[in-house]
Image: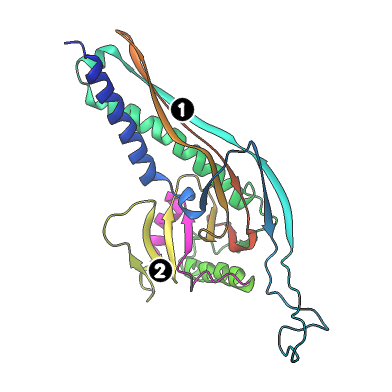
């Protein structure tokens, strides 16, 4: 029996709800940054230089005389700008599958469209935080050759100390990554397996598995940091960040889903998101390299 218009509308609403629901659970990098809105094509922002502020040699913070002026303090910043980009994809469900309620085809199409958008947005944010896997203004930490997380010499594998070293780099720059409760480690699936198979990790007194429903890549905690897993993290790389402080995703259009109906032929499910990634606090990031041999 051919769907009525009401049934078609109901189907469109279900697909819209499913895609947005799946996407919310699958974003990992987007969950690590501030999420704001914008209506501008080009978006400017100030990138901070991290340091504890002082009043200078002759105007210290400590010891203001009675009735004297307060010392002037100002953080160094660099003006940056970036243009919004659209991230989108679409999939097709053919008329015959709609008539026969082929749930598998619907589910696979929804999954494919969702993953296309989520992966693209998360990859853009990852590239922003790592400065395209090159570092530069962010903190960087290279694991020594022979001490990778899959090193042939098991005793040399020490991801716990590597994470502590990354924390050190961020806290030196005056970002309270531990006391804020917003510190995270982000790795890809292979490095996660290497970490979880490491006895120094699972026997560490701070190690704990995530409780309850696992979403947004939250899988465990170690040395005060949450562990997230994302396929957008490049092989041989890892990232430690202070979430919501390291950067911003400015959204010009939140995830939108449209269903284009061609009667007796197909439904096209189209989804997209428009935004721009901004690295506001590079020193709230530590980019780790050489995680694998």
Whether residue 293 is visible here, answered yes or no, is no
Q: Which residue is mark 2?
A: 201
In percent of width and height, residue 61 lies at 72, 83
Q: Which residue is mark 1?
A: 89
In percent of width and height, residue 121 lies at 51, 40
122 or 244, nearer to the observer = 244
In percent of width and height, residue 76 lies at 74, 64
Q: Residues within 10 Å of mark 2 (few under 14, many from 20)?
A: many
Magenta segment = 174-201
Tell me the colour scheme of the image. Answer: rainbow
Left or right of residue 73, residue 270 in this image:
left
Which image quarter holds the N terminus? Answer: top left
Residue at (22% x, 20% y) in the render: 7
Which image quarter holds the C terminus? Answer: bottom right
Q: Is residue 52 above or below residue 242?
A: below
Q: Is residue 186 magenta?
A: yes
Disc 1 secondary structure class: strand
87 or 156, nearer to the observer = 87
Q: CA distance from mark 2 to mark 1?
A: 39 Å
Disc 2 secondary structure class: helix
In percent of width and height, residue 92 lies at 37, 19
46 or 95, nearer to the observer = 46
Q: Earlier in the sequence, mark 2 or mark 1?
A: 1
Which picture quadrant has residue 53?
Answer: bottom right
Badge count: 2
Left or right of residue 49, residue 168 in this image:
left
Which picture quadrant has residue 208?
Answer: bottom left
Please state which of the two labelled residues, at mark 2 or mark 1, is closer to the viewer: 1
Q: In this view, which residue lies farthest toward the top? A: 264
Whether residue 186 is visible here, answered yes or no, is yes
């Amino acid at each position: 029996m051919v769907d009525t218009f009401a049934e078609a509308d109901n189907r469109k609403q279900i697909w819209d709800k499913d895609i947005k629901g799946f996407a919310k659970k699958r974003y990992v990098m987007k969950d690590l940054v501030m999420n704001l809105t914008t209506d501008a094509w080009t978006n400017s922002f100030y990138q901070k230089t991290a340091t504890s502020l002082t009043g200078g040699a002759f105007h210290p913070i400590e010891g203001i005389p009675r009735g004297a002026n307060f010392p002037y303090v100002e953080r160094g910043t660099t003006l940056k700008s970036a243009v919004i980009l659209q991230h989108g994809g679409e999939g097709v469900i053919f008329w015959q599958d709609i008539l026969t309620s082929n749930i598998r085809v619907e589910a696979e199409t929804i999954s494919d469209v969702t993953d296309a958008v989520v992966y693209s947005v998360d990859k853009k944010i990852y590239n922003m935080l790592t400065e395209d896997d090159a570092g530069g203004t962010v903190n960087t930490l290279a694991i020594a050759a022979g001490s990778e997380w899959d090193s042939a010499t098991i005793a040399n594998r020490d991801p716990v100390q590597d994470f502590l070293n990354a924390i050190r780099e961020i806290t030196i720059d005056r970002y309270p990554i531990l006391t804020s409760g917003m510190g995270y480690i982000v790795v890809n699936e292979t490095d996660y397996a290497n970490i979880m198979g490491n006895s120094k990790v699972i026997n560490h007194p701070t190690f704990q598995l995530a409780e309850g429903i696992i979403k947004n890549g939250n899988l465990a905690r170690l040395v005060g940091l949450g562990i997230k897993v994302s396929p957008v993290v490049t092989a041989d790389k890892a990232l430690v960040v202070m979430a919501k402080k390291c950067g911003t995703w400015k959204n010009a259009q939140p995830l939108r889903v449209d269903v284009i109906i061609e009667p007796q032929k197909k439904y096209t499910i189209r989804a997209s998101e428009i935004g721009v990634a901004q690295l506001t606090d590079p020193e709230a990031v530590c980019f780790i390299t050489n995680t694998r041999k």
